[in-house]
Image (cartoon, rainbow, N blue to C red):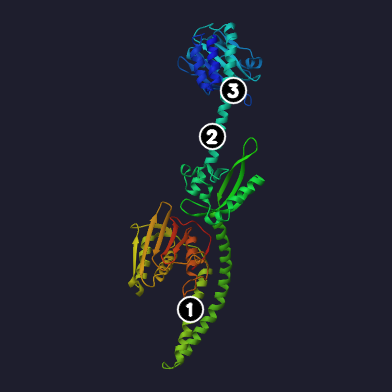
Amino acid sequence: MSSDLFNEIVQDLNAGRGFQDIFDMIYTKLRGEMPCNRMGVALYDPARDTLALHSCRSDGPLLLKEGYVSLLQASSLEPLLRTGEPRIIPDLAAYLASHPKSEATKLMVREGMLSSLSLPLIARGNPFGVLFLSSRERNAYTPEHARLTRTLAGQISVALERSLLVEELRTSKEYLENILQNSADAIVIVDQRDLIRSWNQGAERMFGWPASAILGQSIEILIPEDLRESAELARIREVVERDGYIQGLETVRISRDGRHLTVSITSTAIRDREGKIVGRSAILRDMTRVKRLQADLVRTQSLAVVGELAATVAHEIKNPLAGISGAIQVIADAIPKDDARREIVSEILAQVRRLDETVRDLLVFARPWTPEPQPTDLVELIDRVSRIIRQQERMKTVSMKKQSPASLVLQADPRLLQEVLFNILQNAVDALPHGGSIRILVEESPAEAVVRVIDTGTGISPEHLPRLFSPFFTTKTRGTGLGLAISRRMIEAHGGRVEIDSELGVGTEVRITLPRETPALPPFPGKGA
């Protein structure tokens, strides 16, 4: 091998070229120096005791290709790796005749190769592969070729080992980056000036900011104004610099569209080689849904207790109430029509009827039942309820418009949905004492149907919004405060949800979301059994 080829290999190694580039260069140059129609490199895997073809080049078609794997044990190459001595096969056809089970030799002969030179690749004293040179001529290789190519094998060993280490580092880097980027949690890195330096896809999904728009900005862009004023960020920085980390801090952050998210933060100090803190990493987990589920669980447990109590109270009150109503009616019938006492008795009867309505609502709220889903046209059901609502006197000053598909069929209990729709629309009418408008929007997707009822009424105070679905809570002068609680539970029995947004003096939007197919659910408090 000429010194020029050797020097070129060394220069390419020092230049940091990849193994495949160096391998191709060696193959091209080597063909002008010695017999070489084919060159290949196989890697040894001691754990599996196998040789796997890593790279190969030929001046003709390749049958023995990259990825070919053979067992080393009891093969003719085993002594080569054990002793570190090269092997020359002067006649591959004759060798195949004496070793008919050698699949690799069979493929090489079919490629037209008639002789070969194999050299072990040694790295830090340990064999880790084999270099194969092949020729289309018999007796092409001599011991002198083997001696000259030992240096070549050593340089290939250096290039291949370095390439494998670089590839392993690149693979590990890509693997870690994929984990960080594809994490469902937001992973953010900030420097000592609290500027965002890394922003993964989980952060993009959670907060709505693409990395291109937020990198380089202060992390304070995610912190609500009240927490900025209370210097929360400074306290986090202080703890992380003192202890090295802060774990499970539950706080609030803001998304790009202004939503407040409850998050759990784990932040860790990032240090340079000298141990100096140069920044912080933070993993933020969105706890908003978890908190909502926890609140729903508490609410469900509370409602179960209230339901049991309500059923007991309702049953205890119902019969005496019927007796009182009957007795007062008898008294009323005995009083002359022009007697002033008759008006007092009539008022008593009205209050008894109001109590009776409350008792009936309590029984509806407390009695177990199971929805009976059937094909139900939601649009037709809304039209039916709207016709009933429009018959009220107050609707003369209220406009009601509907925007929907011609039909939307889902699996639901029509009796229960009708009761919910009537309750929601009646509430919208009640919110318009001086007139206004009600819009009903029906939207659909393959999995869900959404009914939006939007009014231009008085709206609801912010302090009242969290309590709207609580039993017995009402902002009306009359009513039991059970209507929305019952409606919500009826919708939840279908696997859906009810949400309310409102602004005082502007109006209210109620969203009813229903699955197209009602899931099988346990019995749920409501009417009927």
What percent of the width, then of the height, locates residue 87? 60, 11
Q: CA distance from mark 3 to mark 2?
A: 20 Å
Q: Amino acid at mark 3?
A: Glu
Identify the mark at residue 156; answer none if there is no mark.
none
Residue receiving disc 3: 161
Q: CA distance from mark 1 to mark 3?
A: 89 Å
Residue receiving disc 1: 354
Label located before the other in sequence (3 or 2): 3
In terms of depth relative to the viewer, which is nearer, 514 or 229? 229
Label located before the other in sequence (1 or 2): 2
Vertical order, 442 against 79 (above or below): below
Vertical order, 352 against 193 (above or below): below
Q: Quadrant of residue 275?
A: top right
Identify the mark at residue 174; answer none if there is no mark.
2
Q: Residue at x 48, y 19 (%)?
A: 63
Determine if residue 208 is in view.
yes
Q: Residues within 10 Å of mark 1 (few under 14, many from 20)?
A: some
What percent of the width, then of the height, locates residue 199? 52, 43
The secondary element bearing badge 3 is classed as helix
Vertical order, 2 against 277 (above or below): above
Q: Is residue 368 left or right of residue 510?
A: right
